[in-house]
Amino acid sequence: MDLEQFAVILSIGLFNGLIVALVAIGYTLVYGIIELINFAHGDVFMLGTLLTYFGLVAILPGFGVEASLISALALIPFIMVITAVINASIERVAYRPLRNAPRLAPLISAIGMSFILQNVGIILLGPSPKAVPSVLPNDPLIVMPGGRTLISLNEVVVGAVTIPLLLALAYFVTSTRQGKAMRATAQDREAAGLMGINVNRTISQTFLIGGALAGAAGFVVALFLGQAWWFFGFPFGLLAFTSAVLGGIGNITGAALGGIVLGLVKSISDFYIEARWTNVIVFSILIIVLVFRPTGLLGAKQAEGA
Amino acid sequence: MKLRNLGALSAAVLIVASACTQSGAPATGGAPATGGQPSAGGGEKGTITVWSSLPRQGSSKGQTDTIVNAIKLALEERNNQAGGYTIEYVDGDDSTAEAGQWTEAKEIENATNASSDPDVVGYLGTFNSGAAAVSIPINCRAGLVMISPANTYPGLTKPGKGEEGEPDNFYPDGCKHNYFRVIPADDLQGLAGAKWAKQLGFKKVYVIDDSQLYGKGIADVFRAEAPGQELEVVGNDSILGTETDYISLAQKVQQAAPDLVYFGGITQQNAGQLWRDIKDAMPDVAMMGPDGIAEQAFLDAAAEAAEGTYTTFGGLPAEELEGEGAEFVSTFKERFGDLEPYTAYGYEAANVLLDAIERASARNPTDNAQLRAFVLEEVANTKDYQGALGTWSFDQNGDTTLTQMSGSQVVDGEFVFQDIIE
């Protein structure tokens, strides 16, 4: 076996996994706090790619700014705020009224929201994928003795955006007052309310954070893969949701770990087996893990154990 | 009791209505064909109807507008006459505004209306292969001939090239084969791709398909034909359009070191992403695909990665037509403006039908039912036809014997015609 090649495949999988992890955390945060699989989450992520596309082709040129890596990075906060607000609005409109309804009801409204967002994507972007202007150079950064590129500049940008966000989230959840309120609400919503925590606000805040991370992930994907597509919510959502379950749904560290594991599995399977078998392999691994560890790799629902 | 009365009433209405359509249609001049005794000889034999069924709304409207204009031009050039009959033309629409494309219900409606009207002797269409699969059996049972200007799905005519049971299931209960097309089918594209790759001087090719009927079919043919064209297949993969990226696959392709990557598939199966990821890993590799990516959407998706891509198209672009074809192109341009890829095929389909009507009329059919049967036979007998597309015949499957394909390349973000692939 060609070890250098293997190293390249691992590096590709790692950086893909980091993106998946950002989306996966959105699923797991929401599940941890209201035990709902937010099916619209993947589509909020898709809106992130869409906003990046329009930011680079319409908004930046509209202000007379040339689309470059620096000006693109300046878009991140705006994209994160917009997707955060969209995600929180979805909670307010589609989930909160159903909070005390049977558990299937919000699940169905989540699927409905997902379709609505997909169609918004179709209306704005059209039915086919659109190329995002390439502002991310993929110059080789670390080249191995055999001449293959191990890490390129665009991968470093992926890491530079995702890793600080993951660390910031971990800090927020473990070490701030609001993070403590989140953990308390996740543990026991009623008791948290009795202790004076504003439960509604805390839940909204969770959706804001999840939406912001999805927006950031959308930005990274639009630049890294170079495309925006209304359909993106599905493949990434599926992969991210699977990562969240693999790592233990509700467990933030687990979601990040699950994302990276799946990124590696996907990359290895694409290369050594065949691309069309990748989903089969991903889900076989999921099933095997769940048979032996029904709560996922790190155990389910420990939003407090960030 | 009341219900039964209603039933009887509606039956009576239906009979009257159908009697009206039978007697009401031939209103244009001359003695109408009465009681199945067309007045033979002396020019005017009555009025017969030709239908077309095309998606007249939605994304295909641009194409079908030009096809309908081409059909009208063909009729005009003969003063709406063929074999002594006056031809009435019905521009049928098999799409709905809501769907934005063809729908099964509309296509069934068109085929039923056309085939149940005894004055209808020909059905030009469809545009979409899926629509043809719906209307062929309906028209076949009624013995009504269909000529398509645009269907390319091989299974409609070719045994073993489509799904199991095709094409026999389109011609149920042993009805006479009634479907013909003037455009070469998709299975020839794989072969054309392999031939062109050899002409362009490629030696090692990596074949990828999108796991779908259309794309995998073409890619399989390409792979089978490659050795005969001195191409070495250094690897092959099936992808799914639902994957997030193909970066690892690009590594695999790079390791196999091909000088050409052939993709059997369509834009909507994530071709743009595939192109970008492969070009990222191998900026110098050439890429080729079938007409499923020969569209603006592909250029939007792949952007700069599309540059230099080779594509094949089943048939010839309008600018390459000669003789009668070139004449048609210049007349059409004068009257209606620019041509679309399928415009000339619409003109050819209409002319083949009108010529068949003339030959059928010469056999003196006793009534319009017999005329319809004769027209079907005469279309099937089309041999060494000299038309706008060149000289060709229908083979026993109803396919054109023309196998010419055109090859284009993306130059400065546009498809530019390069070569005719024989």
Image (spheres, coloured by chain):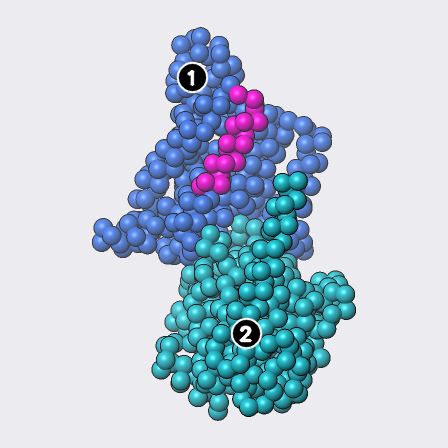
Chain colours: A blue, B cyan
Q: In the image, what residue occupies the spot 53% across and 44% down?
A: A234
Nearest the eye: A178 or B131: B131
Answer with the quarter of the image where residue B221 lies.
bottom right
Does A272 sit above or below residue B337?
Answer: above
Q: Is residue A291 visible?
A: yes
Q: Chain of mark 2?
A: B
The answer to whether residue B345 is magenta is no
Kind of residue sitting beneath label 1: Val
What is the x, y in percent for residue B324? 48, 89
Front residue (pair B330, B70): B70
Camera-near label (2 vs 1) is 2
* Residue B169: quarter of image: bottom right
Q: Which residue is mark 1?
A: A199
Magenta range: A101-117
- Relative to residue B81, is residue A302 depicted above or below? above
Residue beneath label 2, please? B49
